[in-house]
Amino acid sequence: MSRVQLALNVADLESSVAFYSTMFGTAPHKLRPGYANFQITEPPLKLVLIETTEEARGAGVNGALNHLGVEVDTSGDVHAALGRLQEAGLAVSEELDTTCCYSQQDKVWVHDPAGAPWEVYTITDDNPASTEDMEFVGRMNDGACCTPESTAHSVPSVEAVPTSAVLGSTTTVGACC
């Protein structure tokens, strides 16, 4: 089943988990230090909460968008999205066998014309041992995980984006996801 993913930066994971558990009537699917995700069935949504420091988020910024995503079933679906995006002339960044959000993933990144980062990804291992490493946990909390590494990107004008393209473009290289 494909579903849209919304990843939010939060200042207080515990209160955010309580709020979203109440809002969507479900407990988190995965809860780790500085990280939680919900697999919501109605509406189909993967909600990811990433606890970040004020320094990583920006002073006074709470609930800011971290990134958007589309979770797909297989690596083949990721490769199909990669081909579709490249065929549309969009710049993409591919990450295979990467550890991100406390799971092993294959993914492709693009940016929309306004610069919002999107990922199309599949989870190949939902609980790899490497995510218990405290260095990994530190990267999550510093905002270095689950976003493209570089914020510098080239965004075409709206006229330059093919009408068949659903997602935008960038030439970034991913960090951990």
Image (cartoon, grey):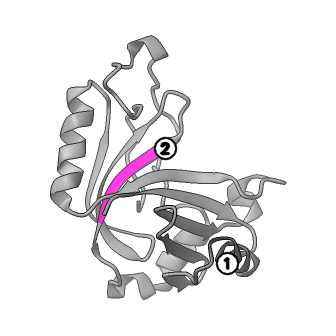
> How would you classify the magenta stretch by its main secondary structure?
strand
Q: Nearer the viewer, residue 123 or 44?
A: 44
* Disc 1 + disc 2, Cβ < 8 Å: no
Q: Which residue is mark 2?
A: 117
Instruction: Provide the residue designation for mark 1.
Output: 17
Residue at mark 1 to residue at mark 2: CA–CA distance: 23 Å
* Residue 131 image position (x, y, % from top left): 41, 82
Q: Quadrant of the N terminus?
A: bottom left
Measuring from the top left, give residue 135's x and y in whole percent: 49, 79
Q: Which residues are magenta?
A: 118-122
Which amino acid type corresponds to the residue marked 1 in the rendered image?
Val
Placement of the C terminus among the 4 image quadrants = bottom left
Residue 12: percent from left, percent from top: 75, 74
Residue at the location (44% across, 87% down)? Answer: 132
Q: Is residue 157 visible?
A: no
> What's under tag 2, amino acid-wise?
Pro
Label 1: which secondary element: helix
Q: Is residue 142 visible?
A: yes
Look at the numbered disc 2 and give the secondary structure of its residue.
strand
Query: Which mark is drawn over residue 44?
Result: none
Left/right placement of residue 54 relative to residue 169 reads right
The residue positioned 44% from the left and 46% from the top of the image is 118
Q: Position of residue 53 (x, y in %)?
A: 71, 66
- Give the left or right position of residue 40, taking residue 91 as reference: right
Q: Looking at the image, how many numbered discs can be counted on the residues?
A: 2
